[in-house]
Amino acid sequence: MLTGDTLFAELPEPLLAFNRGGEIYCAFNLSDAPQQFAASECTALVSQDTEQVGSTLKLGPNGFFIGRI
């Protein structure tokens, strides 16, 4: 994640998601309530309280997802 452009997804608060270098996708739920949104399918590298169902990413309270596109 040291090189490449960062492209932020347009998501409502309290969600933060971005694509780094066209290879890594990161998503964070910055709230204490579960959240879900449409996201590109990718392979999880590390996550916490996360479920990926097709193109829907579900993040639990303060959950996060880091995956390879």
Image: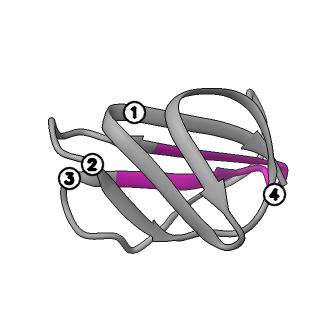
Quadrant of image for the C terminus: bottom right
In the rendered image, which quarter is residue 36 located in?
A: bottom left
The three-letter code of the residue at mark 4 reads Gly
Residue at mark 2 to residue at mark 1: CA–CA distance: 8 Å
Q: Which of 54 and 9 is in front in this view?
A: 54
Q: What element carries label 2?
A: loop
* Marks 3 and 1, the one that precedes in the sequence: 3
Residue at mark 4 to residue at mark 2: CA–CA distance: 27 Å
* Marks 2 and 1, the one that precedes in the sequence: 2
Q: Residues within 10 Å of mark 3 (few under 14, many from 20)?
A: few
Residue at mark 3 to residue at mark 1: CA–CA distance: 11 Å
The residue to which callout 2 is attached is 34
In front: label 2 or label 1 = 2
Q: Main secondary structure of the magenta part?
A: strand
In front: label 3 or label 1 = 1
Q: Which mark is residue 37?
A: none
The answer to whether residue 40 is left or right of residue 32 is right
The residue to which callout 4 is attached is 22
In front: label 4 or label 2 = 2
Residue 3 placement (x, y as % from top left): 78, 36
The three-letter code of the residue at mark 3 reads Pro
Queried whether the magenta region covers residue 20, the answer comes back as yes
The residue to which callout 1 is attached is 63
Residue at mark 2 to residue at mark 3: CA–CA distance: 10 Å
In front: label 4 or label 3 = 3
* Marks 4 and 2, the one that precedes in the sequence: 4
Q: Residue 14 carries which label?
A: 3
